[in-house]
Image (spheres, helix red, strand yellow):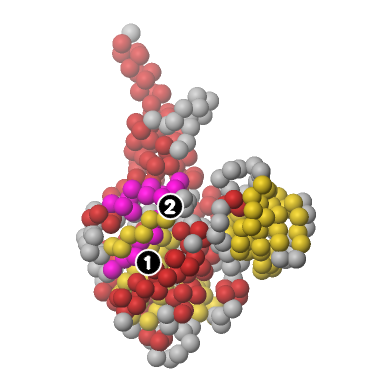
Amino acid sequence: MALAAAAVALTSYGAAGWYFSGELYKMGLSAAWQRAQKPNYDVMVQSVSRGVLVVSSRSPKSPIFSKGQWGISWPGGWARLTKLHKVRGNQAEWSYSMLSGSLERGARVATTVDVFGPTPAALGLPYSSVDFSGPLGRYPAWIVPATSSAARATWAITVNGKSLSRLDCMKIVPVLHDQGMTVMMATYRNDIGAPSSPNGQIGYGSTEWPDLQAAVRYALSHGAKRVVLVGYSMGGGIVMSFLQHSAIADRVSLAVLDSPVLDFSATVDFGARHQRLPLLGVPIPQFLTDGAKWEASLRYGLDWSRMNYLKGKRPPVPILLFQGAADQTVPPATSAELARLHPRQVTYVVTPRAGHLESWNLDPSRYDRLVAQFAKNHLD
């Protein structure tokens, strides 16, 4: 009887591990699944007048109820929420600027941390589209050139998160440009327009860092003498992986990270704690998460240690690290740990109430001021 019960328990455990490892692959590792995701049009436009927009949401955690700056998008259009005037019930009144398309009462829109629309045109700065050669072929990039030839010796290269696009990065471009930098918004494998990874998997920096290395080589071959790296979410993990593995990491002068994925295993644990077991409705216990990760390592060839950048060598450059205290995607504890491990290298900035990649949106002037001062301190 005891052996039979043990066999049933082991079978159930194995089946649960198999199921959750498949879910982990789908939502965390599959580039195809990521590309198939659509915006959540969960905000409704209640009224539109000249320069003023009233929107509503059933979620009390919606960004429309938070001061700062946010983007809203819908099929065929984009707008920027610039100033929150008042909140009444489930409605919020905002000043806004239209970036593209048109809005009417009753339209459903999605909120986003991306406030400049789908291309750098809304920045009001000249830019060009280029391709650079990398390990899997040709990768697209946008380049915003510095205004003076003398300043063009410093290039900033931005690395977006697992969003498959460069929109994560545009909000930092104006302050970098103001500091006299040429800004290259690069792509990496599985991004829109970039080559797909051979196995279709996302590597959280373990496989993508050679793509960033190719972007750095492009900058160096086009006049860059100093390089600044900027990484958002998974892009922060790619920056850290590059700094730990690349033979040309010494050409980088400083880095800016925002909500970086520094340990994918810890990120999976963090996400699982916010999920519920199907049917039972209780939190996923850690032993099931551990089983799913073990099964995933067997099924998908994962080496979890290669996606942990907290255990590597000391960062070779100064790092400005932004982290939202209310991040529900990446554990704030991993950012705090990087700052604890390397207090001389890491300037750690925590933004209260900020969710994932929301530090700029809640207080753009503070964010830009800190970036500008950090660059001046370490580049002048």
Whichever of callouts 1 and 2 sits on the residue coming sooner in the sequence is: 1
> Is 50 part of what is drawn in magenta?
no
The residue under the point 36% across, 33% down is 286
The residue under the point 34% across, 36% down is 290
Badge 2 marks a residue whose secondary structure is loop
Under mark 1, the amino acid is Val
Q: Which residue is mark 1?
A: 256
* 10 Å crowding of disc 2: few (<14), some (14-19), many (20+): few
Q: Nearer the viewer, residue 198 or 87?
A: 87
Q: Residue furthest bottom?
A: 149
Badge 1 marks a residue whose secondary structure is strand
* Picture coordinates of residue 289, whole percent (x, y): 38, 35
The residue under the point 47% across, 36% down is 275
Q: Nearer the viewer, residue 43 or 166?
A: 43
Number of marks: 2
C-alpha gap between disc 1 and disc 2: 19 Å
Q: Is residue 36 above or below residue 13?
A: below
| 166 relative to 224 in the view: left or right | right
Q: Which residue is mark 2?
A: 352
Q: Which quadrant does the C terminus fall into? A: bottom left
**Magenta-tinted stretch:** 318-337
Judge whether residue 360 can be spotted in this image.
yes
* Picture coordinates of residue 247, whole percent (x, y): 26, 71
Q: Is residue 255 above or below residue 329?
A: below
